[in-house]
Amino acid sequence: MSAERLFLLAGKRPGRGWWSMLVLRRQVEEAIEIGKDIKIRILGIEGENVKIGIEAPRDVLVYRTEVKKMLEESCSVQQQAGRRA
């Protein structure tokens, strides 16, 4: 893979340690694989919106970030309410 199409970003988050992010350029119908069981495919691009497909085993939970955050906040509120009861 050429240097134009693949690079790694790295940095340190305050109090949270090091992170890295592999940045790839993909075109429609191209995919990337994560491990043996997960494949992410670019299905379409419309303006600033990218439509992706994710193939993963049923036991792998896949959430949009905003949905996961909402679920975590809801769970936290329920746990706090349970402690007060």
Image: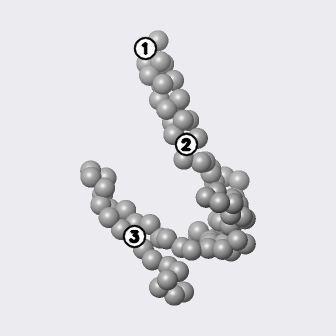
Q: Which numbered tag is attached to residue 16?
A: none
Q: Amino acid at mark 1?
A: Arg
Query: Residue 21, relative to residue 74: is it above or below?
Result: below
Mark 1 and mark 2 residues within 8 Å of each other at the beta carbon: no
At horizontal 58% and vertical 41% (from top left) the residue drawn is: 67
Query: Do we see residue 54 in this rendering?
Result: no
Q: Which numbered tag is attached to residue 84?
A: 1
Rounded to the nearest angstrom, the CA distance separating label 1 from label 3 is: 44 Å
In the picture, measured across the screen, residue 65 lies left or right of residue 16, that is right
**Depth check, front residue: 8 or 74:** 8
Indicate which disc, 3 or 2, sits on the residue closer to the N terminus. Answer: 3
SS class of the residue under badge 2?
A: helix
How packed mark 1 is, by other alpha carbons closer than 10 Å (few <14, some 14-19, many 20 or more), is: few
- Residue underneath mark 2: 66
Query: Residue 30, relative to residue 66: is it above or below?
Result: below
Of badges 1 and 2, nearer the viewer stands 2
Estimate the x, y position of residue 18 in percent, counting from the top left: 32, 62
Indicate which disc, 1 or 2, sits on the residue closer to the N terminus. Answer: 2
Q: Residue furthest top?
A: 85
SS class of the residue under badge 3?
A: strand
**Depth check, front residue: 9 or 83:** 9
Estimate the x, y position of residue 23 in percent, counting from the top left: 49, 71
Estimate the x, y position of residue 36 in percent, counting from the top left: 63, 71
At horizontal 70% and vertical 71% (from top left) the residue drawn is: 28
SS class of the residue under badge 1?
A: helix
In the picture, measured across the screen, residue 4 lies left or right of residue 26, that is left
How packed mark 2 is, by other alpha carbons closer than 10 Å (few <14, some 14-19, many 20 or more), is: few
- Residue underneath mark 3: 9
Mark 1 and mark 3 residues within 8 Å of each other at the beta carbon: no
In the picture, measured across the screen, residue 13 lies left or right of residue 63, that is left
Rounded to the nearest angstrom, the CA distance separating label 3 from label 2 is: 23 Å
Estimate the x, y position of residue 68 in percent, counting from the top left: 55, 42
